[in-house]
Image: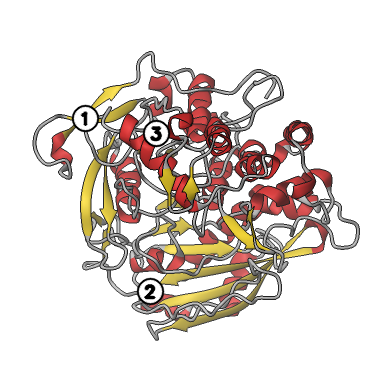
Amino acid sequence: MTEKVTLAPTGLAQWVSMDDVPTAESAAERCTVRTLQSALDGLVAAEVVSATVNRSGEFQPPPPHWSPVPGNPFPDLPLITGLPDFCDVRIRVQNPGGHFAEVAVWVPLRWNGRFLGTAGAGSQTGHQWHDYAVTRSVTMPAAVRNGFATATTDGANRDPRFVDWALRRDTGELDWELIHNWVHRSTHEMTVVGKAVTEALHGSAPRFSYLAGCSGGGRQVLVSAQRHPQDYDGIWAVDPAINWTRFAPADLWPALVMKEHRNPLPEAKLEAFREAAIEVCDGADGLRDGIIGAFDPCEYDPRKLVGARTPAGEITESDAEVMRKIWEGPRRADGEALWYGLRPGGTSWGEYGLCVTTEADGELVPLPFAIAPSYFRWVLQDPEFDWTTLTFERYEELFDQGVRELADIAGDDPELSGLRDSGGKLIISQAADDAVIFFQGTVDYYRRVMDAMGGEEQTTSFARLFVSDGDVHGMCVGRGPGLTMAGGMTALMDWVENGNAPEVIVAERVDAATGSVTATRPVHPYPAVTRYSGSGDPDNAASFTSRRLAGEDPPGRKDGV
């Protein structure tokens, strides 16, 4: 086993040098069902289904079991190439409620001595086989190329329904055993199984263990830190879908506003409002870069744009009111905030986001983000519930009902003393212009962690939050530079293994077509924020400095929420 690895990002998804790591052919000899089954006996109720050595350098991912459009199968995924030799193990784990989780473990023959657990996405715990360097979702191909043993689990969920899988087909009731798999149980089982298989193959346990996930996977890894704090030495939660019982219903708010006002805003009008807000609010950070800083207030009144012409027609009073309510976020009838709204400078339309519209019967209608209407079906335990029957009054009632009755899935427990006491380290990163997860909610969670852990100094000793301006959900291709897979993992490993707490992580903006880096910007841990120093090249990290947010608290949870 290699005691130390060289941490030096040489690309978006390569951060560990494998030059000096030897090949262990003995691991290939032990890559058998019998050997690995004996290693698992007594740990969990698990059956090793297969164990094979893959020396082809390739892997063909199977299509997901779910489809975003019922009756429309998911297209074939691209062949993954450039893989090292590895032992590919498939394991079946029995869960309560008659469920069986399928765990995949990949252990490279050239092993860096470490384990890296991977996570799902959306409301799925499932396997992520994709291989896209511009994402921050660390998947198994990236892990084995960097020399990690790695694992993934489907959480026993093979329902073709993308978001309604938690509702029993026979009764419509919630399958709480399957939900518990998704919330935390299957991640823990995957970890136990993955480490045991790795030790059986290489003869020693992983020296360090890491867990990383984005979006729904970010929720998954944060809940692991909350409920199973001794499983990992280092955890990276990217754009985490925590606060599930608040952000999920809030994701429906833009569509509900457009529906109730009978005024779905076309993309051209949404873009006009965004550009007008940037024209007024951009530059508070010393730049004119088309980005409104995450912690810079933008008080732009959309009514100022009434009468302006767009390719979709003239901006009306109704348009401005719809935009105002979407930016403001969900409110009670008395005006009290339920959760956060979309940021004026961000984009949340087109093919992906919360303000998407489509044409039906010759008319423009709102098309909500899939998780949002499904969440209300979970609350009501009614697979036939139609979100278009909601009114503002009914929305408020169901919002409160979900917070009360589905608290177990919220993923927002700030009590992290178990992780702190075990010596674990946590990095949370959040894109400020996230199109589906309100960055303020992640800040809200971290502030609650600081309160629970005794303050900033006590918290930053083991957990740090990085918010990147202008960055988008899960990918480093937004207007503002974002953290890369390699950048985040390097910072986490350096903290865990060398004791170097990250004071700054350099974010990069990437051209998705070429993979080239077009801009950089340092991101400092909250509550410090980055400010342009006023000299030099704005795309050069050295031209930026940071200041603290003393006395500039972001909005927190409202009373009664």
**Distance from the alpha carbon under mark 1 to that under mark 2:** 50 Å
Q: Secondary structure at mark 2?
A: loop
Q: Nearer the viewer, residue 237 or 269?
A: 269
Residue at (43%, 61%) from the top-left corner?
204
Q: Secondary structure at mark 1?
A: loop
Is residue 103 visible in the rendered image? The answer is: yes
For label 1, the residue is 286
Q: Nearer the viewer, residue 445 or 141?
A: 445
Residue 420: percent from left, percent from top: 47, 31
Amino acid identity at mark 1: Gly
Residue at (69%, 57%) from the top-left corner?
163
Q: Nearer the viewer, residue 226 or 166?
A: 166
Amino acid identity at mark 2: Leu
**Distance from the alpha carbon under mark 1 to that under mark 3:** 25 Å
Please count the marks in the image: 3
Residue 464 numbered mark, or none: 3
First-in-chain label (1 vs 3): 1
Question: Local crowd at mark 2 within 10 Å, few (<14), some, or many (≥20)?
Answer: many
Q: Is residue 197 above or below residue 450?
A: below
Q: Is residue 234 above or below residue 475?
A: above
Residue at (39%, 62%) from the top-left corner?
148
When asked about the image quadrant of residue 308, the answer is top left
Q: Secondary structure at mark 3?
A: strand
